[in-house]
Amino acid sequence: MYAVMGITGQVGGQVAANLLRAGRQVRAVVRDAARARDWARRGCEMAVAEADDRHALAAAFAGAEGVFLMIPPDYDPEPGFPRIRKTIDAFLAAVEQARPGRLVFLSTVGAQVERFSLLNNSRMVEQALRGLPVPTAFVRAAWFMENASWDVAAARSGLIPSFLQPLAHPLPMVATADIADTLAATLQETWHGTRIIELEGPRRYCADDIAQGFARILGHPVRAEPVPRDTWETLFRSQGMQYPEPRMHMLDGFNEGWIDFEGGAAEARRGSVELDTVLRGLVQDHTH
């Protein structure tokens, strides 16, 4: 049996579907069982647990051959990342108690980077999990291609405001389908100690590639335009963010190149899903 967090999200859901197709039993670790009724109908066992509830997580992880761990999204973390620290404490206590067969954590490109950014949350989780007496794998995924979902409406108008700049600067990107395939496959493997798997798509893409992809799919010209760096803080605060600095520094890291893969002893993987395939699906999703 495999315990899967985030099953109602795009990555966790695809991980669970892959495991079910492989004939594996899945225990869905959810905050709200009502939101996961479809997974119960598909044969998943339900376990209700908040990410910072060590006792509920321990019960959810008990008896599992493998556990897929992910942290709840927090794009506006308070200084010092207090929410993620509570989650880390719960993860450690739950795993120590339940002793599942192995752990696979969805981490991020740049998790090894010490410089301050939003991605420090994954760095903190990785550092904490390394001390556990359970085989552990960190799948460091590139920038999600699906982040372009936010650009569909703008692309229909022909102009995409871009925080990725310079517009021709290529970044490591990957589709969630490739992420889920790697996570599900890794969960079913056997190893000792700690693994780092660095995952990106078949090639690197830039903001101009996103605009040109939308243009091909929508059948009209689409261009990207940089959002001036000196407007970011005011813009993010106007959208309700209280602590925009971590997000701003993350974008700086991608744009300036200091957020990238570590290489070295890490296992380098390439997905197969092209950016246009993801963009086409996003456009279709926003049509219905």
Image: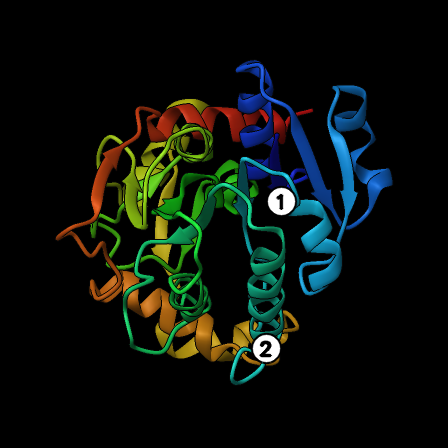
Q: Is residue 4 left or right of residue 191?
A: right
Where residue 111 sits, quadrant-wise, is bottom left
Residue in the picture at 25% in, 35% down: 269
Q: Position of residue 199 (x, y in %)?
A: 30, 41
Residue in the picture at 27% in, 69% down: 113
Q: Nearer the viewer, mark 1 or mark 2?
A: 1
Ranked by sequence position, the earlier of labels 1 and 2 is 1
In the rendered image of this protein, does residue 188 appear above or below residue 138? Answer: above
Residue in the picture at 39% in, 73% down: 117
Q: Which image quarter holds the N terminus?
A: top right
Q: Is residue 24 left or right of residue 109?
A: right
Of residue 29 and residue 133, the one placed in the foreground of this image is 133
Q: Which mark is residue 5?
A: 1
| SS for dot 1 | strand
**Which amino acid is tagged 2?**
Arg
Q: Which mark is residue 237?
A: 2
Q: Position of residue 252 (x, y in %)?
A: 31, 69
Q: Position of residue 279 (x, y in %)?
A: 45, 30
Q: Residue furthest left?
A: 264
Of residue 94 and residue 33, the one placed in the foreground of this image is 94
